[in-house]
Each structure stands twice: as C-alpha cells, then as structure tokens.
Amino acid sequence: MAARQRQQLRLPPEVNRALYVRNLPFKITAEEMYDIFGKFGAIRQIRLGNAADTRGTAFVVYEDIFDAKTAVDHLSGFNVCGRYLVVLYYQ
Amino acid sequence: MTPEAMQQMRWASEIEARNRPLTDEDLDAMLPPEGFKILKPPDSYVPL
C-alpha cells in the first residue's frame, strides 16, 4: 500500500472501525462480503449474523479508522442483489 | 512550538489512540457474542 497521505483532519467521535451493516441478502457468501468491503482497506474481521434475529446483518471491522470512514461514505445505499445496504458506525 | 502545532500533535495522538491495533479480545468485548459467526477470509483475499 503506498504510504497514503494521512489526512490531518479530525474525525467526529462517532467514527469507528466497527461497522454495522443491515439489509444484506441472507445467502451472501464470505467471498462477496470480502469483495464488497475489502475495496476500502484491510479488513480486521467480519461477523455475519446467523441467528433468526441477526440474519441479514453483519459487523465489519477495519484495521484503519480512515478506511472505515471511506467505506461508510461510499457504501451507504450500495445495491446488493436488489437490496440497498444500510452501513452504520457501531457504538 | 506554535499553538497550532501543539493542537495538531494532540489531534494526531488522539487518532493514533483510536487506531491502535485491535486484539481478538477487544473484538469479542466490542461485538455481541451470540448470533454471529466469524467469516473466514477467502484464500483469494489479499488485504489492501
């Protein structure tokens, strides 16, 4: 990774590396998840909901806080198999 | 050391504090324990 010019701006307090994603298709695979979210930076971990009440949601944790912010800025409203993703910072 | 430089340093250290590496225990503490399974990264996955 080229040494990105680290923006010297402050991040609002709610910006966080852990993202909570909703409205995912139930049959989404690990490859698709890593493909969609991996574009924005190195992923620390992804947890996909597999219980009745958590299916269709996931937690995506990035290594770098700026990558998480870029992901939220770009992915909100992203269309996956006809469903619009809801991507929020997890508090 | 001008006040702006000091403020810049304080902001940088704050960002560093929020960006320190997360251990697995941190993740378990942060995220809900049940109802989710950890996805194994596919072999084709190469971190950026």
Image (spheres, rainbow, N blue to C red):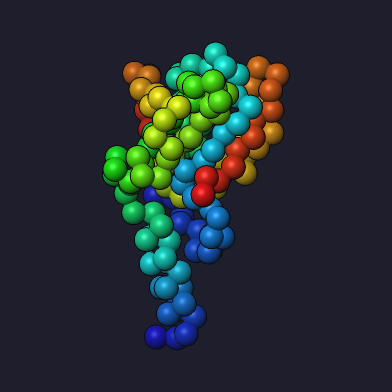
Residue B32 percent location from the top left of the image: 43, 37
Direction top: furthest residue: A27
* x 29%, y 40%: residue: B24
Residue A72 percent location from the top left of the image: 59, 42
Of residues A6 and A14, which is closer to you in this image? A14
* x 60%, y 19%: residue: A25
Direction bottom: furthest residue: B2
Residue A42 percent location from the top left of the image: 40, 37
Considering the image in quadrants, where does the N terminus of chain A appear? top left
Of residues B33 and A80, which is closer to you in this image? B33
* x 39%, y 34%: residue: B33
Q: Is residue B46 above or below residue A4?
A: above
Which of the 4 image quadrants contains residue B45? top left
Of residues A2 and A42, which is closer to you in this image? A42
Q: Is residue A12 above or below residue A1?
A: below
Q: Is residue A57 above or below residue A27?
A: below
Of residues B16 and A3, which is closer to you in this image? B16
* x 47%, y 85%: residue: B3
Q: Is residue A15 left or right of residue A85?
A: left
Q: Is residue A33 visible?
A: no
Residue B20 percent location from the top left of the image: 34, 54
Q: Is residue A41 visible?
A: yes
How many numbered marks appear? 0
